[in-house]
């Protein structure tokens, strides 16, 4: 009888402790999500910003630095995925010569974007705890590279202008590039906000 009471007491304590830990984790996660939502109001596409970053709420916590690193990592991931997709399109047979040229141009543009985003990720890591003009130098480099990446993305979509290039290839490339452009634009907005505060 005493053993069963002791086991029941221990189970009750473990349940209460687990509930308290779970409530604490839930509260922390809710705070992180609220931080992301508040931060994303500075972006052009706030709903996409919240959607793409909320998955990482626990790692972002309420850290502005972790927020911008995560936003940039999301942008890089989407750009790399798009690069792979466009590369596969360059291997398609039976594509019109003008479409093939536009696809090739898009591949070069997304390749440049990926390179610039990789450099930006490295620059943020190298920034460490820099302050003052050193901090501004690192942030300026990142802003320049991301802005250039946005230009690359828009150049690809512009290359498909005109009715001669209407069709599935144009639509699928455009949809992917627009998505990359939007998450990249959001990352830049968050980085600009971060840079202006420090």
Image: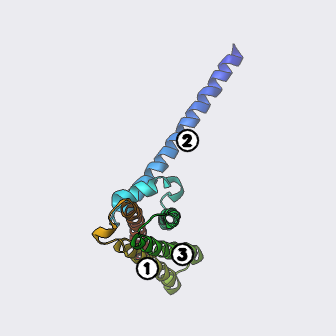
Q: Residue at x 45, y 57 (%)?
A: 53
Vertical comparison of 20 with 67: above or below:
above
Toward the right, the furthest residue is 3
Q: Which residue is drawn at 53% across and 39% down?
A: 20
The numbered disc on residue 84 is none
Q: Name the residue under label 2.
A: 21
The numbered disc on residue 148 is 1
The answer to whether marks 2 and 1 mark residues whose Cβ atoms lie closer than 8 Å is no
Given residues 5 and 96, the one toward you in this image is: 96
Q: Residue at x 54, y 75 (%)?
A: 115
Q: Which of marks 3 and 2 is nearer the N terminus?
A: 2
Given residues 191 and 108, the one toward you in this image is: 108
Of badges 2 and 1, nearer the viewer stands 1
> Residue 140's spot in the image, x, y percent?
46, 82
Of badges 3 and 2, nearer the viewer stands 3
Q: Which of marks 2 and 1 is nearer the N terminus?
A: 2
Q: Mark 3 points at which residue?
A: 115
Q: What element carries label 1?
A: helix
Q: Residue at x 44, y 57 (%)?
A: 52
> Residue 89's spot in the image, x, y percent?
49, 64
Q: Can residue 198 be seen in this view?
A: no
Q: Is mark 3 on a helix, strand or loop?
A: helix
The answer to whether marks 3 and 1 mark residues whose Cβ atoms lie closer than 8 Å is no
Distance, label 2 to label 1, CA atoms, is 45 Å
Q: Is residue 87 visible?
A: yes
Quarter of the view holding residue 196: bottom left
Q: How crowded is mark 3: few (under 14 residues within 10 Å), some or many (20 or more)?
A: some
Q: What element carries label 2?
A: helix
Vertical comparison of 150 with 50: above or below:
below
């Amino acid at each position: 009888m005493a053993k069963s009471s002791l086991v029941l007491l221990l189970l009750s304590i473990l349940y209460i402790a687990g509930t308290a830990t779970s409530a604490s984790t839930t509260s922390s996660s809710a705070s992180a999500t609220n931080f992301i939502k508040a931060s994303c109001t500075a972006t052009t596409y706030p709903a996409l910003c919240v959607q793409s970053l909320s998955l990482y709420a626990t790692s972002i916590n309420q850290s502005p630095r972790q927020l911008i690193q995560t936003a940039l990592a999301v942008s890089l991931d989407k750009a790399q995925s798009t690069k792979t997709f466009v590369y596969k399109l360059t291997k398609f047979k039976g594509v019109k010569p003008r479409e093939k040229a536009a696809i090739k141009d898009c591949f070069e543009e997304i390749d440049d974007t990926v390179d610039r985003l990789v450099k930006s990720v490295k620059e943020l890591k190298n920034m460490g705890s820099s302050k003052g003009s050193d901090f501004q130098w690192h942030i300026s480099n990142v802003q320049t590279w991301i802005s250039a990446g946005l230009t690359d993305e828009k150049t690809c979509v512009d290359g498909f202008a005109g009715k001669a290039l209407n069709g599935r290839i144009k639509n699928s490339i455009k949809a992917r590039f627009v998505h990359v452009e939007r998450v990249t634009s959001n990352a830049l907005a968050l980085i600009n906000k971060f840079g202006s505060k420090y």
